[in-house]
Image: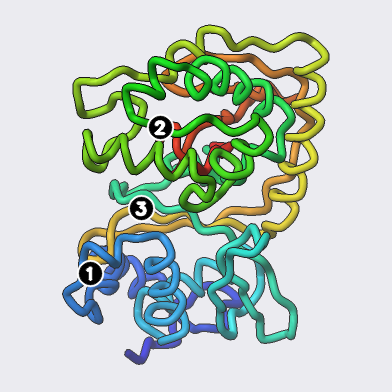
Amino acid sequence: MIYPETNCLKDNPYYICKEIMDGIVNNIVKHAITKKTDGRKTAKKDEDIRIKYLCDNVINDYSELGEHMKIEYYEKFNKIILYVEKKGGNNIHYDILIHHEDGTSLRCEEKGSKHYREYIDETTPPHENSVEFYNGPAEKFSISNKYLKLWYNLVVNNPEINQKYNLPEPPPFKEWLLGGPYCMVDPKSEYSIKTKENYRNIYPEKSMNGHGHDEIDYRIEPNNAFDMDDEEKSTLIKEVQDIYNNIMNQKDVWLQTTGTIDGPFSFKWFDKIEPKKIVDVELVKKKDIEFIFKLEDNTSFTGIMRWGKGCGFSCFRMDFK
């Protein structure tokens, strides 16, 4: 599409007219991203696929929506996007590397929600309606050892439970940690492998949280017994502060999106979010253990300590959101 050069945005190198943009942007935002879908709608809703699609088929492909995103980016940051790269994984805590025409680049975190909103509130955090902004091994946080010791004593080293699920002799605590909860994929130790296998022989695809089947939620007893003293709180704050600072400092800009690839879609660019000092932490016992990290500006974020590959089996992790 060729846009006229009259009544254009002041100093805008793209020469896109406000009159034109005002007339077409709703249609672009609602429909342009659907032009190149291949029918695999469910798979494309996955976060990685969505980000890759945005990079390859929207921004880098000079689509109408992509051009509009570049215009908004220029007006926000005074930088012209040359091209973008999908990133993430391997301790890279940002999703997109944005390359500019002047040779500079910025690291961008994309946070999307499948629930479409026509207007995105720029006064609220870009990640407020999205999934966690960090998830990683709970092993990085000392408090996880205390909780898992309770789980070991109350669940793993429980003769009735082991007999019920025909489990082998429990290994020592440290061995169980490495082969089960601190294993970030499927369990590796004989005991944890058998726990998952035998439990799911009785309750296919289920885990030890009782969700969706008539069985005990084995989180209840460890959760009830769990607490933190002042020293443990101070240690947790320090450990989280270090990781939180690193995460936030790897993100130079943010992109919030709402909607889906196959439907209405909106976006907004956000400035860098500077990490703030954590001044306190509050323990909240829900179905999983939660920590409310209170920041110096009276805002907060939540840490959720939970199992990631089946409750009681493996991948004990911490999520921040």
Q: Residue at x 56, y 78 (%)?
A: 85
Task: Provide residue 154's location: percent of width, then percent of height.
Answer: 51, 15
What is the secondary structure assignment of the residue under circle 1? helix
Q: Nearer the viewer, mark 2 or mark 3?
A: 2
Q: Residue at x 56, y 79 (%)?
A: 84
At label 2, counting other C-alpha atoms closer than 10 Å, the crowd grade (few under 14, some 14-19, many 20 or more) is many
Q: Nearer the viewer, residue 140 or 45?
A: 140
Q: Residue at x 57, y 73 (%)?
A: 10
Q: Nearer the viewer, mark 1 or mark 2?
A: 2
Which residue is labeled 2 in the image?
A: 167
Amino acid under label 3? Thr
> In the picture, which quadrant includes the C terminus?
top right
CB contact under 8 Å: marks 1 and 3 = no
Which residue is labeled 3 in the image?
A: 258
Q: How many numbered discs?
A: 3
Amino acid under label 2? Leu
Which residue is labeled 1 in the image?
A: 31
Task: Provide residue 303's location: percent of width, then percent of height.
Answer: 58, 30
Q: Nearer the viewer, residue 149 or 234?
A: 149
What is the secondary structure assignment of the residue under circle 3? strand
Say whether residue 164 is left or right of residue 179. Answer: left
